Image: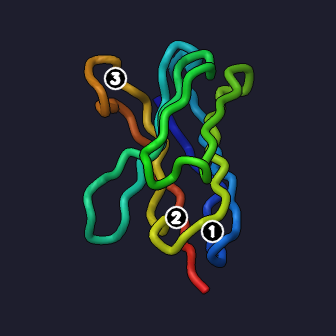
């Protein structure tokens, strides 16, 4: 299993970024997927999840209305569109494969892509 994130960077408050996660080594379309972020000195924070077909999406309250999760099963790719970014969104963003055993339980993570929101 391999998950490789890209698209991070530095952006001013109010700006946008689109993260991508290229998945390989498993049947991508068979798994719910999530984005999880970790800010310096803090534990992992679940951000968003999407079901196998992409018809159901879920967000933590702090990003609702600003972030959009999506997937392209033909391309084995997960996305996170982030708009109206705030300094508190600064973190290392990981895509993660849901284990299917419990809520907020992931069995594989990518290395992450850094998002920094600063003026």
Q: Is residue 92 left or right of residue 76?
A: left
Of labels 3 and 1, earlier in sequence is 1
Residue at which label 3 appears: 99
Q: Crowding near pointer 2: few (<14 within 10 Å), some, many (20+)? A: many
Of 51 and 65, nearer the camera is: 65
Marks 2/3: CA–CA distance: 24 Å
Q: How far across and how far down the image is residue 46, in percent?
A: 38, 45
Residue at horizontal 48 percent and vertical 40 percent from the top: 59
Q: Residue furthest bottom?
A: 119
The numbered disc on residue 114 is 2
| Image quarter of the C terminus | bottom right
Of labels 2 and 3, earlier in sequence is 3
Q: How far across and how far down the image is residue 30, in percent?
A: 52, 13
Q: Crowding near pointer 3: few (<14 within 10 Å), some, many (20+)? A: some
The numbered disc on residue 9 is 1
Instruction: Kindly indicate whether the residue at mark 2 contacts the one at mark 1 (C-beta within 8 angstroms).
Output: yes
Residue at horizontal 62 percent and vertical 22 percent from the top: 54
């Amino acid at each position: 299993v391999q998950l490789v994130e890209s698209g991070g960077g530095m952006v001013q408050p109010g700006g946008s970024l689109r993260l991508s996660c290229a998945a390989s080594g498993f049947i991508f379309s068979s798994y719910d997927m999530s984005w999880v972020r970790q800010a310096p000195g803090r534990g992992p924070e679940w951000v968003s999840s999407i079901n196998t077909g992409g018809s159901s999406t879920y967000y933590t309250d702090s990003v609702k209305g600003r972030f959009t999760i999506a997937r392209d099963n033909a391309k084995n790719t997960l996305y996170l569109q982030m708009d109206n970014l705030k300094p508190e969104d600064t973190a290392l963003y990981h895509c993660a494969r849901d284990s299917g055993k419990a809520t907020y339980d992931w069995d594989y993570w990518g290395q992450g892509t850094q998002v920094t929101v600063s003026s």
